[in-house]
Amino acid sequence: MLGIVWDEKFKEISFSHPMIRDISKERIRRFIEIARRKLHFVEIKPEKATVYDLLKIHDEKYIKKLEEVSKIPYIGFLDSGDTIHYPGMFDDILLVLGASITAIKYSKFIEKIFIPLGGFHHALREKAMGFCPINDVAFSALTLLEKGERIAIIDIDAHHGNGLQEYLYDKPILKINIFAYDGKFFPGTGKIEERGIGEGKGLNYNVQLPLYSGDDVFEEALRILEIIPDFNPTYIIVVAGVDGHKDDGLKSLNLTCNSYNLLGLKVKRIAHKSKIIGYGGGGYGKMSSECMVSFLLGLEGKKEEIETRTSSDKEKIEKVKNEVNLFLQGFS
Ligand SMILES: [Zn+2]
């Protein structure tokens, strides 16, 4: 069964830069519309988190700041120019975090749960970053870890999940990041050699994709997911950011919705008995909502091809193939 954590308020929430804030809200509105048409799911209403929950992932000083800026009667920036604050934002933050709490609770009864407005993988303990005021994914991972669960995270997005990596670098959680990388593209982090430390040693995987790749390169990268069954997770958390789509405002990976459908199909295949909690991640283009639904159709085992597959040059394919092979051979 598939559950989607949904509140009508999600249609009005976006922490993105004012230039793309409307696109970002529109994506969530269209998502639920298309999802209701094409998918069978149960709607789960999120509870509201508390400040106590926020303390698990953020500094007290930063939480105070979030509360304060939420009282300012105009829009401003929480960081150097990406993530905004706006009047009443703190309430929205608690609702967004609450979605993860609800997903964890319901995951006892529902094996696949999706949070469309979530996956804020850039936020750090003491600051906002890249449209992310809080790190809801780190919250879920740390909460499940405390409960004694065995967790694998697949973080797919045009951008490296720097915040998530930092939170979980020394934790016994398998982390796979697939993202666009050229050393400069935001956030510029995610070196292949970063394999984790302490209890997390050897469990951090950064798969870098060349900018302007295509569906074929992405498919090559997904071979890395083969390592998940050996880890034997009880939970798989997927950040299924769709901002690598070719028509996305933050142009980067030249993918089509087919790639996100394939991601869903592969996750379903490797999940066996693992519970799945999925997040919508980034997406700022006209096909973002369709790609999110394509991913969920894949999770249900349904193949969908609504666009013509994109392809890359041989060099890009070879680069990613070698990278994945290196990981599969046990590079540490
Ligand atoms: Zn992104």
Image: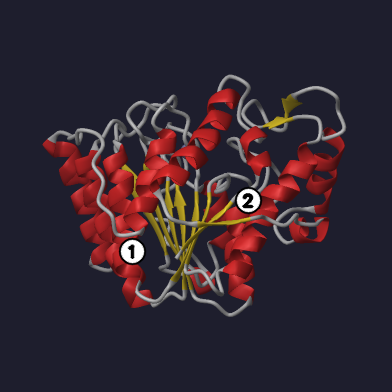
What crowding class fits label 1: few (fewer than 14 Cα within 10 Å), some (14-19), or many (20 or more)?
some
State the residue position of label 1: 268
Q: Mark on residue 180?
A: none
Label 1 CB-ligand 1 distance < 8 A: no
5 or 101: which is nearer to us? 5
Q: Is residue 178 visible?
A: no
324 or 73: which is nearer to us? 73
Q: Nearer the viewer, mark 2 or mark 1?
A: 1
Position of 65 with respect to 299 (left or right) is right
The vertical placement of 274 against 137, above or below, is below
- Which amino acid type corresponds to the residue marked 1 in the rendered image? Lys
- Which amino acid type corresponds to the residue marked 2 in the rendered image? Asn
Percent x, y of residue 224: 29, 60
- At 23% from the left and 49% from the top, the residue drawn is 219
State the residue position of label 2: 135
Residue 13: name its quadrant: top right
| SS state under label 1 | helix
Which sits earlier in the primary sequence, circle 2 or circle 1?
2
Percent x, y of residue 196: 47, 63
- At 51% from the left and 72% from the top, the residue drawn is 172
Residue 51: name its quadrant: bottom right
Q: Are circles 2 and 1 on residues that touch, CB within 8 Å?
A: no
